[in-house]
Structure formats: C-alpha cells, structure tokens
Image (spheres, rainbow, N blue to C red):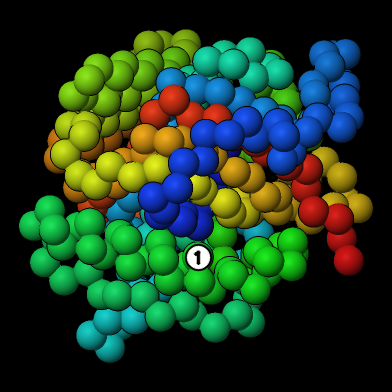
Amino acid sequence: MNIKPLLLSAMLVLSNTGYATDLSETYPVTSTTYLSDGTAVSMPFHVKGEATSAVVGLIDANVAQFFLWNWQWEPVRLHCEGAASKGIGALYTQKITSSPAGAYNETISSFYVKRRGSADPVLPCPGDMTLASAQLDFTGKVLAALAAANAEQQAAGKPHNYALYNQHLMLDNPIAIKAGREIWGYPKQAADVSIDITPHQHTLTLANQYTGKAMLDVSYTRQIGVNLPLHSVGDNVLPDYLLPDFGKVPQLSGVLSSDSGWMMPFVGEFTIHSRASLTTFFLAESDFTPIAVLEFPDVSGVALPLYDRE
C-alpha cells in the first residue's frame, strides 16, 4: 500500500508541537499480511519519505459526484452565494523512500466527502483567491472546520463522517500497487511518476508507462508560506467495487507526521496534457483549480487496517 493519504486523508491539525516521534511507538507492527504472490507485508503499514505534498484546490462538486463510487458518501459542498456547486479536491504526490513494499513515487487524486445524512460542515467561501494571504486563510479555515467536525469520532476511535475519497492513484512500484489493492482496495494503476524536489521547487511529471506520453505536469515554489509542524490524522474512503474483505468497510484511518511541514499558497504551474487516466480525467472534468499546498518534508506515516463492519 501506502501510507497514503494518510494523506491525506487527513484532516489536518496545525501545531507548534513537534511530532517527529517514532510512530512505531504509537502504532507498533502487530501482524503480517501475505499478498497473492506470497509477498509479506507488515501491518500497520509504516512509511518514510522525502516528502508528501497535497495541492489543494476547488472542484465542481456536481461532476465529482459521478466519480464517487461509494454510495454511502457524497461530496462536501461550499454553500456560497445561494449555490453549492463547488467542492474541495486535493492532488497528493508522495516520494516514499522506505516502506514494507519498497520505495515508490505516487500520485493520489482525492476530494473531500461526507457520510450521507451528515450535516454539511460550515466552510468559508473562497472569494478572491489571487492573494496569497487569502489562499492560506481559506485553506486553513477549511481544514480546521473539517477537523472540528470529526473531533467526536476521532476521540472515540470511530470512523470519521468527513474524509478524503481516494478517487484514483498512480505509482511506479508493482508491489505497492498489489498491496494497495489487495489489503485496502485502493484503485491503483501503474505509471511513470517522476518527482524532483529542490530547496525551492517541487516538480511532478506523470506519464503513461507504456508510451512515455506526459499526462500531467505540476510544479510549485516551496517554502514561501507558513512553516509549522503538521500532524495529519484522518480517514480515507475508497470505492466499494475493490473492497477485498466484505467483513470490513472501505474506510481506513492513517497518520502523516513531519516536524517541518508547510502550508503555502500555490505559486506554480498545473498542466493537464492528456485525459488518458482516471486521475487526469477527473482533474480536467471537475475543473480542478489549485489554491494552496500542504507539504510534509521528511515525512513518516502509517496506514491502518480497514475498519470492521459494525
């Protein structure tokens, strides 16, 4: 698998407290899962990486609904100016250097969802997003509101009612693809994923593994926002159709931790070259518009098992 989204998944908590304590102390390995080819994977699934990054943006929530292959959930909507057509998406990139499945580069196409029947969280309206200060203010308020909405479930160790739906993932490690699909039911696909991180720039190129044709290029300027330790605790929701164990629900909890996390305005380029993947097709069809970036340098994380059905 992956850590994922812990990614992400992540309802983020901003803090001045360091979190780089070893997550293995809080989430010790307790079992081994064997993939269909016999590969042993330790669980919970711990990873370390050079960086996990999330480009956060606005999406068309009505379009996102068609990509949500889990009937128990629906997109979170921004209720602004008498309309509720906008939602919030995130494109994650992960440069993982160590995991039970080895190293890998990965993208995760996600958007925020709520369990059907749950109240809509009170979220800010985006307004003019041309100013860096407005981008950071909006993103911070959205994440804080979603974290607050999940506080009761988080404290009780229960599945969250607000989460990230992982619509599609692309990565360059076949073992990690197999682990993600067989252990959790992540919709993973092989691709050429190139991630280059310099002190001031983060660059992603996503390409078809067979033709080499570029599908997506993303680059942004680093270290121009708010530098804070970030601790991400949240749930990931997955499609129903890949669920590997019907005694479970397609939802899991995960954690990402970094002592030098950043929340930054998006200053860069976001270019979709081809819709020939579910990731780029969703980004194009939902009119994904980048606003801000959340980045976890020198990240550690853990993906937990799927929740049991109650």
User: Residue extending furthest front?
Assistant: 17
| Percent of width and height locating residue 143 | 40, 62
Residue 115 vertical placement versus 254 (above, below) = below
Q: Nearer the viewer, residue 136 or 20?
A: 20
Q: Quadrant of the C terminus?
A: bottom right
Tell me which residue sits at (36%, 19%) in the image. Answer: 195
Q: Nearer the viewer, residue 64 or 274?
A: 64
| Percent of width and height locating residue 153 | 68, 69
- Provide the residue designation for mark 1: 147
Tell me which residue sits at (28%, 42%) in the image. Answer: 227
Find numbered disc 1 in the image and state the secondary structure of the residue it sits on.
Answer: helix
| Percent of width and height locating residue 130 | 8, 57
Q: Quadrant of the N terminus?
A: top right
Tell me which residue sits at (72%, 34%) in the image. Answer: 25
| Percent of width and height locating residue 77 | 41, 73
The amino acid sitting under disc 1 is Ala
Q: Horizontally, is 116 left or right of 125 in the view? A: right
Can you see residue 235?
A: yes
